[in-house]
Image (cartoon, rainbow, N blue to C red):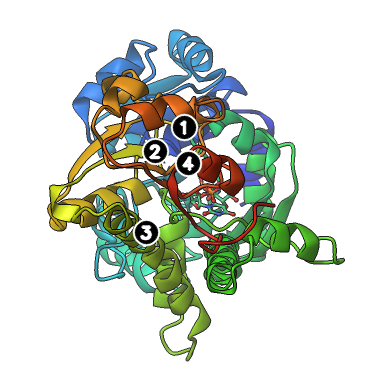
Amino acid sequence: MLDLKHKIESRTLRVGVVGLGYVGLPVAASLADVGFSVTGVELRADRVALINRGECPIEGIEPGLSDLLLRVTGSRKLQASTDYRDLSDCDVVLIDVETPVASDHRPRFAALRGACRSLAALMKRGVLVIVESTIAPGTTAGLVVPTLERFSEGKLNRDFFVGHCPERVMPGKLLKNLRTLSRACGGSTEATSETMVELYRTIVDADLDKTDVVTAELVKTAENTYRDVNIAFANELAIICETAGADFRKVRELVNKSPGRAVHMAGAGVGGHCIPKDSWLLLYGAESAKTELIATSRRVNDSMPLRVARMVEEGVQEAGRHIQECKVLLLGWAYLENTDDPRNSPSEVVAAHLKEWGAEVVVHDPWFSHLNVDPYALSDGVDAIVTMVAHDAYRNLDWSEFKKRMRSPVLVDGRHMIETAAAKRLGYIFRAVGRGVNSVSA
Ligand code: SAJ
């Protein structure tokens, strides 16, 4: 490990990064930018070609990433390849491949296993392999190490070392999060953790916390599980407010005045690439632990899109219609406000339920070019409008204009975008997450 520390100090360390996506590309480019020679291996030849031309294959607005990429590929400090053999001379290899969770809530580690197997066959003696992908607790010991030992015929902490440093990327803030968020540096030995801190110190301004591998595996999955459980509490409180005829937002505001309270925001569901899956990764890694809250929280959050679809069905019934003859407009397709990321979007689930019941569904979203049409024209003849995403662009809509154009005046608010009194004054049949049918607005 001393040798690696010297190479880090002198910037002669050769770094490999497997997987040049949201996680791998920013870290590869950042390490290259501080002077390391970095080889990125990516399965997709088209992405490799783009990157080597200094072009950024990541969609969306990522401040600083395109310029950084142009700089480090121009200086050839970063080179991309499809060939694992280009990693054979690397002293440290970061693994940044996808670790998805399937519909059975169990992780699919095929990409991780494949990366370890390909790397093991050619990695040099003494290499430090650091998994940055989010993994279930126990995956390093149960999958990464055995695969590396088996296909390298080497031994952990003798012929190679491993670490886990979970990523905390967020689309739109890839470089900012990388530089400003703390990282757990879980090493297979104390010296390994120290070396990891030395390496990440070259690109991270925040805390770098030495720890063991299992703790590092728990940190990322637990921090997102914490958020999911808190959102589930907010959603259940909203359901209680609906039946109690109260306004969740007012209850939340007054509860949060109490020290140490921070009730999250109830809504039409929980989407994205992290929160819905990390709870399942945590549970998968702790199968022997008898827990209930975490899985129940997932079910609560996953029930919210159906709850919103049922509000549409109730609303059109009140308007004297059957859902199967209705047309519904969803405002928002992204999983999160002011983003163009549709992964695991609650809107997709609401649309599926409504279509299953025979309704026609039209979608608007200013962040998707093919959905960024005139929302008022889109509302001609619809029977219900649903606010699914709290995009800033939806803050100043003309609800009276919508009402004029609709066939039936049903409005369902999934993200606290309209006051109850205003909706009723305009003559809407109104439903909202967290607000009873007769509740008074906050
Ligand atoms: N949501 C709610 N109520 C809330 C908060 C979120 O319903 O109070 C919903 C959102 O609408 C969205 C989903 O949950 O559909 C996820 O929202 P998010 O704000 O958690 O955004 P993510 O999925 O991008 O979460 C990421 C996570 N960061 C990483 O995994 C590195 C999370 O840990 C961060 O807290 C979050 O970004 C953030 O706010 O930065």
As shown in the figure, which amino acid type bears the numbered disc 4?
A: Leu
Q: Does the residue labelled 1 lie within 8 Å of ligand 1?
A: yes
As shown in the figure, which amino acid type bears the numbered disc 1?
A: Thr
Give x and y (percent) for residue 162: 49, 59
As shown in the figure, which amino acid type bears the numbered disc 2?
A: Ala
Q: Residue 336 carries which label?
A: 4
State the residue at coordinates (52%, 57%).
164
Q: Which mark is residue 57?
A: none
Say whether disc 2 or disc 3 marks the residue closer to the N-terminus. 3
Say whether disc 1 or disc 3 marks the residue closer to the N-terminus. 3
From this view, report whether residue 293 is shown above or below residue 298.
Answer: below
Q: Residue 223 appears in which quarter of the rendering?
A: bottom right
Give x and y (percent) for residue 363: 28, 34
CB of mark 4 within 8 Å of CB of mark 2? yes
Q: Is residue 388 visible?
A: yes
Q: Name the residue under label 3.
A: 311
Distance between the Cα atoms at labels 4 and 2?
5 Å
Q: Can residue 141 be seen in this view?
A: no
